[in-house]
Image: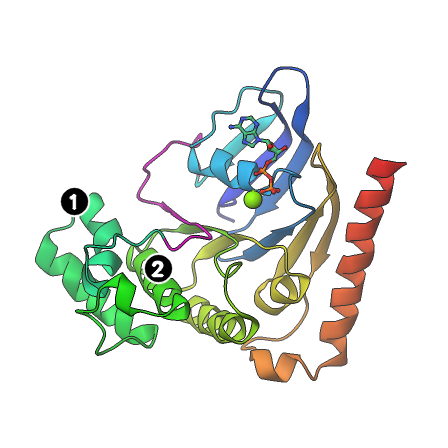
Amino acid sequence: MSAPAIAVDGLQLSFDGTNDVLADISLQVAEGEFVSLVGPSGCGKTTLLNLCAGLVAHTGAGSIRVVDQAPREGRPEVAYQLARDCLLPWRTALDNAAFGLQVRGVPTDKSRERARAMLAEVGLAGYEQSLPKALSHGMRQRTALARTFSMDATLLLMDEPFGALDAQTKLQLEDLLLRLCEQHRHTVLFVTHDLAEAVAVSDRVIVMSSRPGRIVADVPIDLPRPRSIRELQKDPHFHELYAQLWAHLESGWVKHEG
Ligand SMILES: Nc1ncnc2c1ncn2[C@@H]1O[C@H](COP(=O)(O)OP(=O)(O)O)[C@@H](O)[C@H]1O
Ligand SMILES: [Mg+2]
């Protein structure tokens, strides 16, 4: 068996040397797996992604390995997508979608070719020359998805990519993400505060407690794939899993407050 894409063992982190942000986090994400992290605001979800991306240095106890190495910024194996779409306002949708590849030194022609194909996959054929200001929030987030998936990284880190969208657009983009993952089979570590979203897209959901973030549950999502957001809403097991996650989340709050 190949090494896990992410292996975190007994990890502890504090920014000021006294108050822990993360306490004794152990988790593994297998190659090809889609794992979500949920937990109260401030419990350290973004910090954990930043550690994986090499943007925050690990200074405390425990260990972290990402695609077989200590985390390091700028690795081609790892792509990071944030809640904000982070599109460059002066670049067209095509050149925004190609930007990640261009930063990695892929020639303009090649990167545009790949980005054009990805824009078509996310439903934006015909919008290649549009500037971000001419795109809706949903279309901007589709462009950001095209940029992320263009990069062909082994591991995608996604921090609440649909957090700022209206409910309907969010459901459409969750469906799109399901299709992109079926097609491209990356490993994904996905942060969301939306439990229904976590159930819909994941193979496994990890629930964290309030700060200092600990893992309170690791729930396998045994819903068959391929999935469709519309069909999931009618599946009683989807709602059972949602209720289970909600109970774990509450237990993480109670422990902290008590
Ligand atoms: N660079 C930093 N320096 C000091 N404190 C930080 C830094 N980044 C995050 N924190 C603190 O760490 C905790 C976890 O933050 P974060 O990972 O952003 O939580 P989440 O994404 O779960 O909402 C918060 O209390 C936050 O204020
Ligand atoms: Mg966060």
Report whether 116 appears left or right of 200.
left
Q: Secondary structure at mark 1?
A: loop
Q: Amino acid at mark 2?
A: Ala
In which quadrant will I find the C terminus? top right
Report whether 222 appears left or right of 108.
right
| Tag 1 residue | 105
**Magenta residues?**
68-85
Relative height, residue 210 to residue 172 (above, below)? above
**Quadrant field for ligand 2:** top right
Residue at the image position 37 percent from the left and 62 percent from the top: 145
Residue at the image position 33 percent from the left and 77 percent from the top: 123
Relative height, residue 142 to residue 8 (above, below)? below
CB at disc 2 and ligand 2 closer than 8 Å? no
**Label 2 crowd bin: few (<14), some (14–19), many (20+), radius 10 Å:** many
**Residue 39 marker:** none
Instruction: Name the residue nearer the viewer: 237 or 67.
Output: 237
Residue 76: horizontal and vertical position, in percent?
30, 44
Relative height, residue 5 to residue 128 (above, below)? above
**Residue 144 marker:** 2
Residue at the image position 56 percent from the left and 77 percent from the top: 227
The residue most toward the front is: 133
Report whether 223 appears left or right of 160.
right
Q: Amino acid at mark 1?
A: Gly
Residue at the image position 19 percent from the left and 54 percent from the top: 90
Whole-Å distance between the Cαs marked 1 and 2? 19 Å
CB at disc 1 and ligand 1 closer than 8 Å? no
**Where, by quadrant of the figure, is residue 75 drawn?**
top left
- The secondary structure that most of the magenta stretch takes on is loop
Between circles 1 and 2, the one closer to the viewer is: 2
**Where, by quadrant of the figure, is residue 118 drawn?**
bottom left
